[in-house]
Amino acid sequence: MNYKNFPMVPRVVFGRGSFNQLSEIVAPKRLSMNAPFIYLVDDVFKSNSWLTSRISLSYDDRIIYISTKEEPKTSQVDALVEEIILNTKERPSGIIGIGGGSMMDMAKAVAIMLTNEGETHLYQGWDLVKNPALYHVGIPTISGTGAEVSRTTVLTGPTKKLGINSDYTPFDQVILDPELTKGVPKDQWFYTGMDCFIHSVESLEGTYLNAFSRSYGDMAYNLCKEVFLDGTPSTEEAQDKLMMASWHGGMSIVYSQVGVAHAMSYGLSYVLGTKHGIGNCIVFDHLEDFYPEGVKLFKAMKEKHDIELPKGICATLSEEELDTMINIALGLEPLWENALGKNWKKLMTPKQLKALYLKM
Ligand code: NAD
Ligand code: ZN
């Protein structure tokens, strides 16, 4: 048995208001006056000076606002990298991502592509990155994806939705300031929070589970239960807990894998553009045969927070589109193997998967 040797985020700050320490944290990493820090910020904060006025810009540092209407694409990373190269005198000192999972992934991908040749889609897969990334910092403003701690950056490319999974992908520094999540709309809070809950269920119920993953998975699972079933969602305590749940959920899948919900959600995302959080919820709601306990809890949480999920989203798809969706989902072999074991192909045929999609 050859055990994997995983990289982890080497530095992390946790605390309400810790965002104010940002400039002090990055200052020693400045390479020269001509090597700026580039801040990639979700454009939801464009008119929110409460957050952006606290970013201190020196020399040629700048903020680039990015829309998260669609999830990150490899072509978008290519364009951004080109724009940064053309408009900076020297290679930047660092990339700082501020926002949700989308912005975490953009920041990681841009930091990798500023030091690696060619187009971004060439690096979608496992361990294809050759050179260390630029110094990169992640500052989540919504909790759940675990992208702040993971070894991947999920991107939609010309032929697949797949992460750049490498030892160079994790952030060099993360700032966890739960206060930054206070403006998240309720539905989005639920969808992204459920991503974390689903990470924990898929990891805990998977065949890849070991004690390392279980310890993190249990923590994420219980914190989600406290946040979504027991507590008052808008309290500071709930914000703090969900931020740590996200971290643990991400750590749990480092050594294991996600499962059926994620595989199917990737299919929805590829064909319909359904976003990760809501896509996982739409799928998970129908997975009681695979995750009975988890789905029961999910339904209780959904009811408690009055969440209505879209229905019939696959009803009008053509046969061809359904086939693409099925191929994308079944192509994620490690996810199915984790969920159903080595014989998964016998347990989940394209026909069965189609029937499941048509229920959604
Ligand atoms: P997101 O980043 O798209 O953000 C969701 C929405 O919340 C956006 O509209 C955003 O503008 C808004 N938002 C974020 N913070 C806010 C705040 N403080 N106040 C008000 N609005 C705020 O969504 P997400 O669910 O965080 O991330 C989904 C993405 O993460 C997907 O692209 C998915 O593929 C990726 N992902 C990556 C990993 C990984 O390990 N790399 C894991 C899971 C998901
Ligand atoms: Zn996820």
Image (cartoon, rainbow, N blue to C red):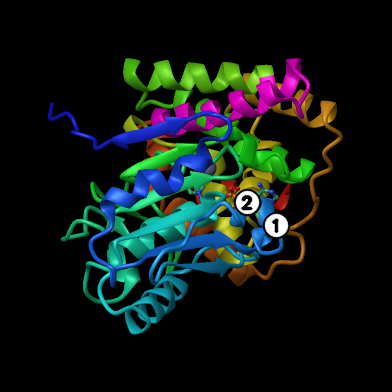
Measure the C-alpha gap from mark 1 to mark 2: 6 Å
Q: Quadrant of the N terminus?
A: top left
In the rendered image, which residue does mark 2 sit on? Answer: 51
In the rendered image, which residue does mark 1 sit on? Answer: 48
> Percent from the top left, x then y, of residue 212?
33, 19
Residue 100 in the magenta stretch? The answer is no
In the picture, residue 268 is in which quadrant?
bottom right
Of the residues shown, which amino acid type is indicated by label 1?
Asn
Residue 289 appears anywhere in the view: no
Residue 97 is marked as none
Horizontal placement of 271 versus 172: left or right?
Answer: right
Q: Do the residues bearing badges 1 and 2 touch, measured as CB atoms within 8 Å?
A: yes
Residue 73 appears anywhere in the view: yes
- Label 1: state its secondary structure: loop
Horizontal placement of 40 versus 167: left or right?
Answer: right
Magenta highlight range: 227-253
- Label 2: state its secondary structure: helix
Q: What residue is drawn where x is 62% and y is 51%?
A: 51
Q: What residue is drawn where x is 49% and y is 46%?
A: 139
Q: What residue is drawn where x is 40% and y is 38%?
A: 149
Of residues 355 and 132, the one nearer the viewer is: 132
Instruction: Check the image and report above or below for 270 versus 225.
Output: below
Extreme right residue here?
306
